[in-house]
Amino acid sequence: MNDKNSRLYLIRQLIREHDVYNQEQLLKMLIERGYQVTQATLSRDLKFLRAGKIPFRDGRYKYVLDETARLDPATEAAPSAGDGFVSLEFAQQLALIRTLPGYANMLAIAIDRARRYELAGTIAGDDTILLIPRDGVSREAVKKALQWIFPDITEKIAKS
Amino acid sequence: MNDKNSRLYLIRQLIREHDVYNQEQLLKMLIERGYQVTQATLSRDLKFLRAGKIPFRDGRYKYVLDETARLDPATEAAPSAGDGFVSLEFAQQLALIRTLPGYANMLAIAIDRARRYELAGTIAGDDTILLIPRDGVSREAVKKALQWIFPDITEKIAKS
DNA sequence: AATAAAAATGCATATTTTTGCATCGTAATT
DNA sequence: AATTACGATGCAAAAATATGCATTTTTATT
């Protein structure tokens, strides 16, 4: 168990247990724990561990591990969500989402969980979701919010 | 279907169908296709799409989409692979991997697929894999190769 | 043990990405 | 139609990350 291995171990642990926004922050944590390295080494370590940096819903970028990518709330809340999504249209001040049969509930839950300000609430049937935007929220803003929740929906709502 | 949406659409498509190593490259592709934007906009687009940049086995960094993260060969070849992995030890010039019952085959396949030079081949039982390194490959190198294949194994082999 | 070979790391720098600010265009509102 | 509000974008600069090269450290070999 040379020092490098334990360092890699710790890095993984830190990424798993903290929100790591950049290497400098991670570096600080390592140094606090007695690991004397530089950012350059850290960069290489992260590459070795195949840790990636991805944008999060909170508007920031975080490092994630391979495994984390699978467990990330964003991913978890909407597992292949886009698959069930069929179409989006607007009527009055409301949005109607069509889904594959049986998918509506699951998608609605994902939408609720996202807690986007723009979206006041949902009512789900079997293959339809009624989406109620908050007062004054434009259709564009609703689309935007949905895209944020389900990035892989982009193509499907391109022309709505 | 404003221009921005179709651009986002195209960006997703490009990332899905090409290996995108950086924003400049992506920018070039967009411009070739008639989208006149700057790298700054691209950065914002990628953030909106929650596209992340992660290190790949080929030693380079690539952009990936949420969905891709789930389908990435590295992930695909070893779906929760680390979970099945129990321990690693060496005997003679050979490596012995212990797995949970029934996992050996799956892990061995993942190892074979990785086609690491260091690893000549595997023989899998039910909960054990015999791993044959190539001539002259050190134990350290074998560990390294395994870590590369299964990043989430790092902790488990820390002290082997 | 001495020597050769390979790996790890720091330093400095290049590369890449993100962002504040100003501007422009478009859509909503009066 | 004029006015206001908001989103999109470019520009330039800051921030963050990756890497070539030189050096040190570790590991293997004779």
Image (cartoon, coloured by chain):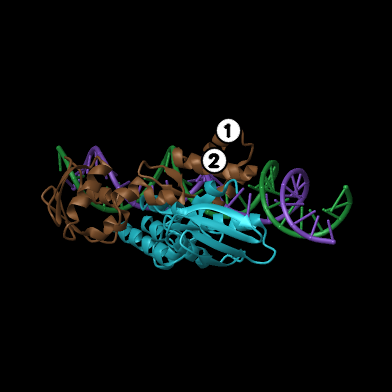
Chain colours: A brown, B cyan, C green, D purple
- Secondary structure beneath disc 1? loop
Q: Is residue B1 visible?
A: no
In the rendered image of this protein, does residue A38 appear above or below residue A44? above
The Cα–Cα distance between marks 2 and 1, rounded to whole angstroms, is 9 Å
What residue sits right under mark 2 in the picture? A10
Report whether A11 appears left or right of D1: right
What residue sits right under mark 1 in the picture? A33
Return the residue nearer the eye: A141 or D17: D17
Residue at x-position 23% and y-position 59%: A84
Q: Quadrant of the N terminus of chain B?
A: bottom left
Q: Could you tell me which chain the residue with mark 1 belongs to? A: A
Residue at x-position 39% and y-position 63%: B35
In the displayed orientation, state which residue is furthest to the left. Answer: A92
Report whether B148 appears left or right of A144: right
Return the residue nearer the eye: A146 or C15: A146
Looking at the rendered structure, whether the residues under marks 2 and 1 are on a common chain is answered as: yes
Q: Residue D3, position in %: x, y?
A: 23, 39
- Secondary structure beneath disc 2? helix
Residue at x-position 38% and y-position 42%: A59
Which amino acid is tagged 2?
Leu
- Answer few, some or many: residues within 10 Å of disc 2's Cα (few below 14, many 20 plus, some between 14 and 19): some
